[in-house]
């Protein structure tokens, strides 16, 4: 998310395949200016589900 413009770079996919993940990373890389340092935080939400 660009804090100044509030632009969010992202895409929702029906399935989370490695090809979709790589496509997302490439999209983010293209949308980010080269002079900026890019940091990303990833979470696999399926591993954090707790059945109560």
Image (cartoon, rainbow, N blue to C red):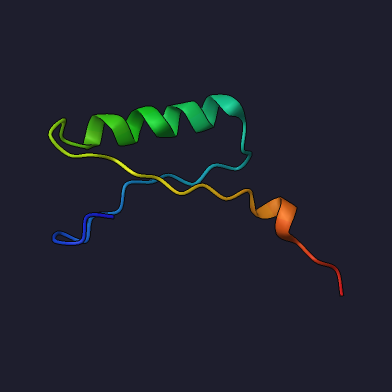
| Quadrant of the snapshot with the C terminus | bottom right
Q: Residue furthest right?
A: 52
Q: Is residue 9 above or below residue 33?
A: below
Residue 35: quarter of image: top left
Pick the front one: 34 or 5 = 34
Q: Residue at x 71, y 52 (%)?
A: 46
Q: Residue at x 16, y 30 (%)?
A: 34
Residue 36: quarter of image: top left
Q: Residue furthest bottom?
A: 52
Q: Residue at x 57, y 50 (%)?
A: 43
Query: x, y percentage for residue 22?
Result: 48, 27
Query: x, y percentage for residue 6?
Result: 21, 61
Residue 7: quarter of image: bottom left
| Quadrant of the snapshot with the N terminus | bottom left
Report how many numbered discs are placed on residues in the image. 0
Pick the front one: 34 or 6 = 34
Q: Is residue 50 above or below residue 23?
A: below
């Amino acid at each position: 998310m660009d804090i100044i413009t509030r632009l969010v770079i992202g895409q929702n996919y029906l399935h989370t395949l490695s090809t979709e993940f790589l496509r997302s990373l490439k999209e983010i890389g293209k949308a980010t200016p080269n002079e900026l340092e890019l940091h990303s935080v990833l979470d696999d939400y399926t591993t954090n589900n707790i059945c109560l």
